[in-house]
Image (spheres, grey):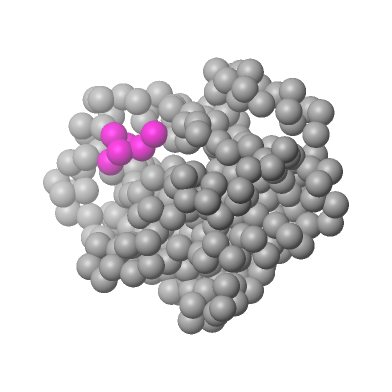
Amino acid sequence: MIAVKFDGRLGNQLFQYVFLKYLQQRNGKLLVFFTNPHHAYIHKYFDLEDADNYLMGSKAYSAITRFLPSILRFKSIYIHNWIIPKEFDIKNWSLYIGYFQSDYYYQQLKIKPSFNLKKEFKEQFNALYGNLYQQNKIVVVHIRRTDYMNYGERRKRDISLPMAYFKTRLEAIENLENYKVIFVSDDIAHVKEVFPEKDNYTFSSNNEIIDFQIIQNADISIISNSTFAWWATYLSPKNNMVYAPKNWFGFKIGAEHPRGIMTKKFIWCDVLAND
């Protein structure tokens, strides 16, 4: 038996779900489960494979899996984010803990999760933005600030990208006036100060799953170092173009962190010291 711990919000949970599928496909003889499915909410938004939606929403399943690792004395194994992802020996009676922020595990899967959004959320998005996306080419700028400006439980630090980075990336797009530009942020008031309103600008004030689809369905995305935006662009049904900050959390020190986050699907852009 093997357990995986859910930790973090939507983006991190998607990485952890993929890691669980990776463990299942590596060894189909072992039972693999989430030790705390009650912390998950990916099943709220996505039609997951097999019985995963039912299990994650089951109070009985949650109660059983919550106590199994302690009763059976599972050994905690931490998958550290400063190590390049690679194949490793899967150990029985283990609880795997980590963020697994890389597409390495996803690419290893023979059968990949489709992560189809539930019909109700697609309909909500189409009601709000369907016509806009059908009639225009779309650029989305995703800017995360708030918690990123004082990040970490023990050693607080600012991992937010400078606003000049987003301005530089946006201004580099040819014929920008021919696009509709949508800003998605947890600090829209500040974004409006940096990017004064224009006829082709829209500022999103929606819930997370609408924002997820705004990013997901864009033709061009300029994203922050957020796993939420990473997955939204990674799962895009379009032949999209994604500009992402080189080295992710490590942009200030010039080293990729977490290791493996820089997928080949994105265009990785330097964040200059004077941005």
Horizontal side, residue 34 vs residue 194: left or right: left
Give the residue displayed 55% in from the left and 23% down from the top.
121
Horizontal side, residue 167 vs residue 77: left or right: right
Q: Is residue 58 above or below residue 194?
A: above
In the displayed orientation, state which residue is furthest to the left.
71
Q: Is residue 40 magenta?
A: yes
Q: For this rendering, which residue is in front, 40 or 154? A: 154
Q: Is residue 57 magenta?
A: no
Q: Is residue 186 above or below residue 149?
A: above
How far across and how far down the image is residue 197, in percent? 63, 43
Horizontal side, residue 198 vs residue 248: left or right: right
Asked which quadrant contains residue 65, the reply is: top left
Horizontal side, residue 169 vs residue 1: left or right: right
Q: Is residue 29 visible?
A: no
Give the residue displayed 55% in from the left and 31% down from the top.
210
Q: For this rendering, which residue is in front, 260 or 28? A: 260
Q: Quadrant of the C terminus?
A: bottom right
How far across and how far down the image is residue 167, in percent? 64, 61
Q: Magenta part of the protein: which range?
A: 36-41
